[in-house]
Image (spheres, rainbow, N blue to C red):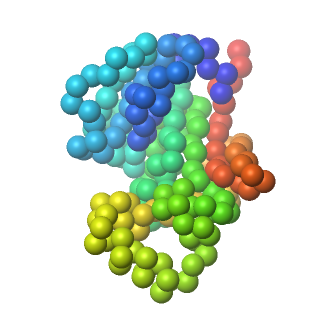
Amino acid sequence: MDIRGGESIIDLGGTVEFWRDFPVPLKLTIVNLPGSVPSESVASKHEVTLLEGDACDVSFASDMKFDIAFSNSVIEHVGDASHRKQMATEVLRLAPSYWVQTPSIWFPIEAHCNMPFWWFYPEWLKSRFISSWEKKLPAWTEMVVGTTVLRKSELHSLFPGCSIWTEWKLGFPKSYVAYNPPKMN
């Protein structure tokens, strides 16, 4: 993304800690669901604004308010296809450049529940696992059930004209990133 420092970045669903080791200072606006924003400020070399909000409706921010819209492993948690489209529309509205990452369905270990080949289990088998998880870890189970991993083709359709970068691990596609880098002056 050729970030040189001073860029204004909106991070949909991120944390201050994620940016801790980034080498240059940034102007970060980090948006998370109500109840997920830390109550006390976190020390950072960046200028940080923490806000409660929804990645599918960032109506508090004007069009093209930021240099870059960023999201790491959030779009698969926002709900059905219409919600994923709403989030993509917001990303495209908020900044001319963006970086949106999501896990790959083709990686053998599912990133949220750590089950091998989870997306290919028959529904009856998934239901059995989910029933046993609900008793022990209800909030975590709710997150797993509410996750829809996107295919590369869906990323292309949500972000027309984007480039797609594939992160590879052990010979498998681990994640996909839809991105549009800043235009060089």
**Residue 128 to residue 52: above or below:** below
Q: Could you tell me which residue is drawn at 53 percent across and 61 percent down? A: 114
Outermost residue toward the right? 171
Q: Could you tell me which residue is drawn at 43 percent across and 76 percent down? A: 129
Q: In the image, residue 36 lies at what x, y percent?
A: 28, 42
In this rendering, the count of numbered labels is 0
In this rendered view, identify the residue nearer to me: 62 or 156. Answer: 156
Is residue 149 visible in the rendered image? The answer is: no
Q: In the image, residue 4 lies at what x, y percent?
A: 61, 14
Q: Could you tell me which residue is drawn at 24 percent across and 44 percent down? A: 34
Q: In the image, residue 108 lies at what x, y percent?
A: 66, 63
Which quadrant of the rendered structure holds the C terminus? top right
**Residue 105 to residue 127: above or below:** above
Which quadrant of the rendered structure holds the N terminus? top right
Q: Could you tell me which residue is drawn at 43 percent across and 13 percent down? A: 45
In-image side of 104 versus 172 (left or right): left
In-image side of 129 versus 138 (left or right): right
In-image side of 168 versus 8 (left or right): right
Q: In the image, residue 54 lies at what x, y percent?
A: 34, 46
Is residue 139 visible in the rendered image? The answer is: yes
**Residue 21 to residue 135: above or below:** above
Outermost residue toward the bottom? 124
In this rendered view, identify the residue nearer to me: 143 or 137. Answer: 137
The answer to which quarter of the image holds residue 28 is top left
In this rendered view, identify the residue nearer to me: 11 or 171. Answer: 171
